[in-house]
Amino acid sequence: MWREEVASRSPLAHDARALGRLIEHDHDPPEIAYYEAFADPDAQALDDAQRSYAGQYLRRSRRLDERRKHARSDREE
């Protein structure tokens, strides 16, 4: 289930840019802390890797489902 959630969420870098624009106008300490966490290169690399893995898994799952459908239709003919 987490794969669908990870694959569908926006990249962490987009959230970091949005928070960056927000703290330009309002220097709220919690927002600055969120921005620093989201803008961390290690966190962004981990997020990218998770999203990539989830996307690969979903593509493979769809491809295997298609193969099963074609195999069933071939047997029926």
Image (cartoon, rainbow, N blue to C red):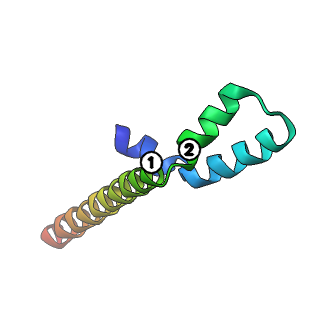
- Helix or strand or loop: what does disc 1 sit on? helix
At 32% across and 60% down in the image, what residue appears? 62
At 78% across and 47% down in the image, what residue appears? 21
Horizontal and vertical percent for residue 66? Answer: 28, 65
Residue bearing the label numbered 2: 38
Residue count near mark 1 (Cα–Cα under 10 Å), binned few <14, some 14–19, many ≥20:
some
Quadrant where the image shows the N terminus: top left
Horizontal and vertical percent for residue 27? Answer: 79, 33
Horizontal and vertical percent for residue 65? Answer: 26, 59
Hey, what amino acid is under mark 2? Phe
At 54% across and 40% down in the image, what residue appears? 37
Horizontal and vertical percent for residue 53? Answer: 32, 57
How far apart are the alpha carbons under marks 2 and 1?
7 Å
Do tag 2 and tag 1 residues touch (Cβ < 8 Å)? yes
- Helix or strand or loop: what does disc 2 sit on? helix
Hey, what amino acid is under mark 1? Ala
Q: Residue furthest left?
A: 75
Q: Is residue 63 left or right of residue 22?
A: left
At 44% across and 48% down in the image, what residue appears? 43
Q: Of residues 27 and 46, which is closer to you in this image? A: 27
Residue bearing the label numbered 1: 43
Residue count near mark 2 (Cα–Cα under 10 Å), binned few <14, some 14–19, many ≥20:
many
